[in-house]
Amino acid sequence: MTQRTLAGIVAVPLLVALWVLALVLPTPVVTNRPGVTVDVLAAPDDRETIQVQGARTYRDDGQLRLTTVYVTQPGARVNLFEAMAAWIDPSDAVLPYDAVYAPEESRQDSEAESAAQMVSSQDTAIAAALTELDYDVTEDVEVLAVTADTPADGKLAAEDQLLEVDGEEITSPQDVVDAVTAAGAGDPVEFVVRRQGERRTVEVTPAEVDGEPRIGILPGIGYEFPIDVSIEIPDSIGGPSAGLMFSLGILDTLTPGSLTGGSTIAGTGTITAEGEVGPIGGIQQKIVAAEADGAELFLVPPGNCADALETDVDDIRLVRADTLADARDALESWVDDPDADLPSCEDAT
């Protein structure tokens, strides 16, 4: 047997072992891929995504599509080949794992946080839209999310308005945290809440979690609205990044005429109650998904403009949206004249 033959015999199993290790061993990264887009003006199963009671509504042609990203879940494995494929694909992105998730974050933690962000973003989007239309909107403190199998599970519920804790008026989310901390684990805390217009008194006993008394809720800012607006989208979609598109959908629903002019518009961005549009993650993947679903125009938060300009797309126009009012004005101008001069990401960079 020659030396070359012997080397080949030795090298083959080593090469096989290396391929097996590449398939089995996880890399410390997560991947972002273009996700689904959802028309907030649609009526799946004959039920409008945006529902309003207490005001006249208008239903027109056209689409306003929120955009999403498929992100590797906490604890999921991304092997070397998957990471390399995502790195090569211009529509995907590869990010360090610890830039996206905390070291001990579980899938349940991520989903709970994402669901809470969605509840908050919907409320804030409604507040922004109604404020834009000169409705009177007031702030309150509410439950954004309840963690399963915690003391509050089954006693408090998402969207409960928090009025009092242990006899004291609640004016900020921190009031709730302070009251639970002061009570300590094992001592009941009495809440007065308003749920679906009904005032209730609920007693919750904190449990010790990581050395701190907790009841398992996420308190946050909520709003009282003069009309009833609700948004129904699949539970699989979470996070705060659909705020701008929710607000535009509500504006379109509550005003005559069509913001889209019968066309397909997509976009992304967080929203504040004052209508300011904030940056999000995965902008390039969202633009790719929007173009694939036929969007002609994409609304970009100013903080994402630099990355948006590097997206490899040809048939979609990028429009900078600094505020809800700016986005509304841009759409109205574009419907009147598709060649109109609109706010651009080039100006922002």
Image (cartoon, helix red, strand yellow):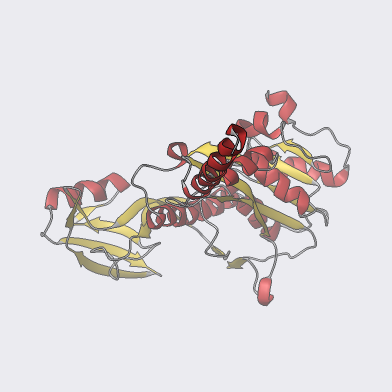
| Residue at the image point whose x is 34% and y is 52% from the top | 219
| Residue at the image point whose x is 72% and y is 31% from the top | 309
The reply to whether residue 259 is visible in this rendering is: no
Q: Residue 193 or 277: which is nearer the viewer?
A: 277
In the image: residue 228, left or right of residue 201: right
Number of marks present in the image shown: 0
In the image: residue 161, left or right of residue 127: left
Pinpoint residue 333: horizontal percent, then vertical percent: 81, 41
User: Does residue 58 sit above or below 12 in this rendering?
Assistant: below
- Considering the image in quadrants, where does the C terminus appear? top right
- Considering the image in quadrants, where does the N terminus appear? top right
Quadrant in the picture for residue 59: bottom right
The reply to whether residue 130 is visible in this rendering is: yes
Pinpoint residue 150: horizontal percent, then vertical percent: 26, 63
Q: Residue 126 or 93: which is nearer the viewer?
A: 93
Report the residue that reaches farthest toward the front.
1
In the image: residue 148, left or right of residue 151: right
User: Does residue 90 sit above or below 119 in this rendering?
Assistant: above
Pinpoint residue 332: horizontal percent, then vertical percent: 79, 45
| Residue at the image point whose x is 13% and y is 55% from the top | 185
Pinpoint residue 75: horizontal percent, then vertical percent: 42, 51
Quadrant in the picture for residue 164: bottom left
Q: Residue 234 or 90: which is nearer the viewer?
A: 90
User: Does residue 315 sit above or below 53 in this rendering?
Assistant: above
